[in-house]
Image (cartoon, rainbow, N blue to C red):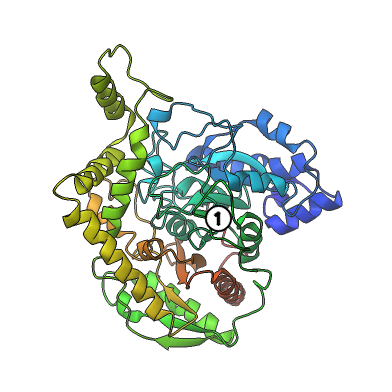
Amino acid sequence: MTASELWRHSARALAGRVRSGSTGVNDAVESGWEGPAASWEAEVHAIVHADRAAREKACAGSRSGALAGVPVVVKDNLCTTEYPTTCASRILGRWTSPYDATVVARLREAGAIVTGKGNMDEFAMGSSTEFSAFGPTRNPYDLTRVPGGSSGGPAAAVAYGLAPLGLGSDTGGSVRQPAAFCGVFGLKPTYGRLSRYGLVAFGSSLDQVGVFARHAGDAALAYEILAGPDPFDATTRPGPAPDVSGWDRGVRGLCFGWPANLWKEGVEREVIAGLEDAASWLERAGAVRVPFDFLPGEYAVATYYLVATAEASSNLARFDGVRYGFRHADTPEVAELYRRTRSEGFGPEVQRRILLGTYALSAGYYDAYYLKAQRARTRIRQEYEDAFRRCDFMLLPVSPTLPFRLGEKTDDPLAMYLSDIFTIGANLAGIPGLTCPVGLAASGLPRAVQLLGPYDSEPVLLRAGRAIEVGGEEARLDREHEQEFAWPAKR
């Protein structure tokens, strides 16, 4: 089987071929780099660090495991020993970690091969992957539009076929939103189910490693391999992770919340049409729609951007030009060294958020801003708990819009922040979320929906995601003018 055919395989199918010996590990790993994706990468710019020699070295002996020979792209804020970890920032230079992140180590134990590091918004601060020291990533469906952020690189790479799986981080929607914009599945697990050890911190109480996949079953497989306690991360949840082996069991008997009040205004028609399609596919599969009004905290956006920036201010204080990475030369005074290094090493969005967070934590303002935000966060968590007493999971938008144009929101930080309005609540509450693609809009851009559930409801979300996947496949077969599979338009 040629590379032009292998790259279309799911992670499960590709690993099965490698274990059986019908496909070599190196062929499986290079299928993306040698197939059509190789020509697309130059224009999409999803990858910031890659090395063929490192891939070939990793292929030696990888013939067993649930992900045997499966190529995976990981976000540039997850530590890897063979590639630099730079968080798409000048301040880290080409720093290379002496250890692997726990999720990366678990991928390797399962036989997977890390084939490159995905582009991102600097230090995961952004919603478009335009705030990168390496330049922006473009949406593979339309090169004039963004792939979402901050994990736009891995999302785009999975969408155009460089790898069937990707890892990102989700602090306020940074897995789910780019998954929506790139037309792939994006799973943000319950906070603490995937270890954060080796993930460069942005907002420690919000950050969660997440998964990109082209198939619901691959998202389930990756979760099964990666989830579980980690002695190196005290915030991981104790006990075994929920069993997701029944991801294809169907949704009969489940009920899903339909909070239509959320999209009465300010949401594009194509996004609402995607919600209606997903709801009808779930109902056809046996799920019951439960309409109700839901207000996930009137001040959710303000709460998130106070908590997140405050934690960012604290976490990024360590990048000072003394221990590693970029350092401003010829500066004898320590205070001036810090100022020049951080001013030149950090980009404008990171500087903005550090300043906002430092202000919120400063003497005289802590109670008025940060402490009040923490109280609002508790209220938001309670509102989600109340909602899940009425349904097994909720169906809602991922973003108010389809992918927007490059440069459209970079000069308007508030407009950029509001693109996360439907995703930040899950991070504040610590609950899992799953982005599910629902086909293409008339413009050819991907549409998607978001499923949210209570703590440890990943098995239910994946079952619902599979039902939506099946409904979408059946709908595509019914529409002869659509292509067999929703790959990016540039084929």
What is the x, y in percent for residue 338? Answer: 28, 25
Q: Nearer the viewer, residue 139 or 452?
A: 452
Task: Residue at 38%, 49% (x, y): give it.
Answer: 203
- Horizontal relation, residue 387 to residue 490: left or right: left
Task: Look at label 1 and name its amino acid.
Answer: Leu
Q: Is residue 300 visible?
A: no
Examine the image and state in which quarter residue 469 appears. Answer: bottom right
Q: Is residue 214 visible?
A: yes
Q: Is residue 97 above or below residue 127?
A: above
Name the residue tied to disc 1.
Answer: 194
Q: Is residue 354 above or below residue 341?
A: below
What is the x, y in percent for residue 42? Answer: 52, 37
- Horizontal relation, residue 202 to residue 28: left or right: left
- Horizontal relation, residue 376 to residue 68: left or right: left
Task: Residue at 63%, 52% (x, y): give it.
Answer: 164
What is the x, y in percent for residue 174? Answer: 42, 54
What is the x, y in percent for residue 407? Answer: 30, 46
Task: Residue at 38%, 22% (x, y): give it.
Answer: 322
Q: Residues within 10 Å of mark 1 (few under 14, many from 20)?
A: many
- Secondary structure under tag 1 reads loop
Task: Residue at 55%, 47% (x, y): give it.
Answer: 157
